[in-house]
Amino acid sequence: MSTINPFLSAMKQLDNAHAALTKGKKKNTAIDQKVAQLREPQRMVNVSIPVVMDDGSQKIFQGYRVQFNNSRGAYKGGIRYHHNVSLDEVKALSFWMAMKCAVADLPLGGGKGGIIVDPKSLSVGELERLSRGYGKAIADIIGPDIDVPAPDVNTNGIIMGWMVDEFLKVQRKKAKLLGVTLTKRDEMKLKSTFTGKAIRDGGSEGREEATGLGGLFVLKTILKKLRLKGRLTAAVQGFGNVGYNIVKFLDEAGITVVAVSDSKGGIYVPEGINPALTLECKKKNGPPDGGLAGCYCSGSVCDLKKGKQVTNDALLELPVDILVPAALENAITEKNASKVRAKVVLEMANGPTTPEADVILYKKGIPVIPDILSNSGGVTVSAFEWEQNLKGQHWTKAQVNTKLAKKMTDAAGAVWIASVSHKTDLRTAAFIVALERILKAMK
């Protein structure tokens, strides 16, 4: 577990953007006061969730929901299940969500939720009871115009479905007390409170791969600006949903992915991995999540002679064109940033690079495409799902992807322009774009 406080890192990023935005300008007390407000969440909720375990015993889990800022619209952000969830982590993630929604120019604010739990230690029944308990516990502080949760680390559409069901029970009970019966249209609107749902529950086409696809659109835009082309190679740390999808889309775009890793370690295949075969091999390696050991899948076969194992740390130091940290935060720090040899870093995880590492990479001339831009495809399609539910519509995948491509390309373009005009790195530029939009909306 990292000892780096993610919220302190987030606040350093805010300070950097504030300094860059006001550099050379006359002191503006109103802006300074608004930025001071952005240093603290508007609301933090801690809930206790009692769960009856399969053996009949009771265990009480701790959960959080942080609502950071809603100046641009309803709070928006995922719910993660992880044994290292902390209030500071959820605060940081909710702040980044506010920035991310603003960078993508979505009419939403920032929020985040989490439960301190190792979900792999729970049975399906225990997981459902925990999820329903959390959904019920936060039901009074969420809603389609208030706060719109979504999946995050170790959560998915099934879990969102359980929470939606519990949330609807609470709303029906409230309506009954008022002598009102909810219509199907009322319930569809209420379902928009959660995004990342299964299609049958009102979910959006293209949501599962949206983060990875959005990352590709952003990367292609920035690569054009950098005039970096030819036969490019990439290494991806993390091979979960986001990691796998970015690997798949990089491969389809003609970028050779030579290394991937998961929590157990990684593989290095100089010829380039086959994404689908590698995922299949990982799953076959055993429950609950398998592992990548021995999955040297290139072309149409898996061959032990074609690759070798690498550690997660070693993967970050490979001589590739594009390095993609797509696991958890604080992967690149001041201890290993000097060893990074990639030409571009594409952040697909939240907060994978510390502020100290940012300085080192900038001095080395390695552009870092920041998380609040590069992985905003997920929340963008979540916003599309929210919009579809509110309007009673269902868009095709082609419609979703077309809208996603425009949003990501426009966002990347705005960040690049800010980087050039303020003569700063891409992360600070992204925060400048977000900060300007949020400050404009704040009363």
Image (cartoon, rainbow, N blue to C red):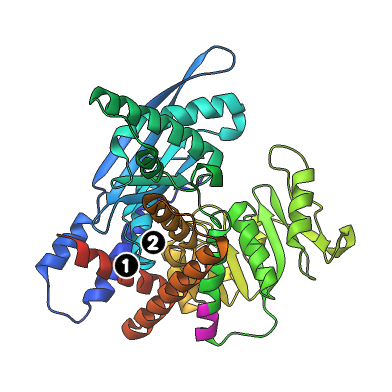
- Residue 166 position (above or below residue 284): above
Residue 412 place in picture, x, y as percent: 44, 75
Q: In the displayed structure, does residue 63 sit left or right of residue 151?
A: left
Residue 166, picture quadrant:
top left
Viewer-nearest residue: 226 or 141: 141
Which circle's residue, 2 or 1, is located before the other in the chain? 2
- Residue 296 position (above or below residue 164): below
Residue 18, picture quadrant:
bottom left
Give the extent of the magenta segment: 221-225
| Element type where label 2 sits in the image | helix
| Residue 66 seen | yes
Amino acid type, callout 1: Ala
Q: Which residue is mark 1?
A: 434
As for residue 205 lying within the magenta part, the answer is no
At 65% from the left and 57% from the top, the residue drawn is: 244
At 29% from the left and 50% from the top, the residue drawn is: 68
As for residue 222 lying within the magenta part, the answer is yes
| Distance between mark 2 and mark 1 Cα atoms | 7 Å
- Whether tag 2 and tag 1 are in contact, CB under 8 A, the answer is yes
Q: Which residue is mark 2?
A: 100
Amino acid type, callout 2: Lys
At 39% from the left and 28% from the top, the residue drawn is: 169
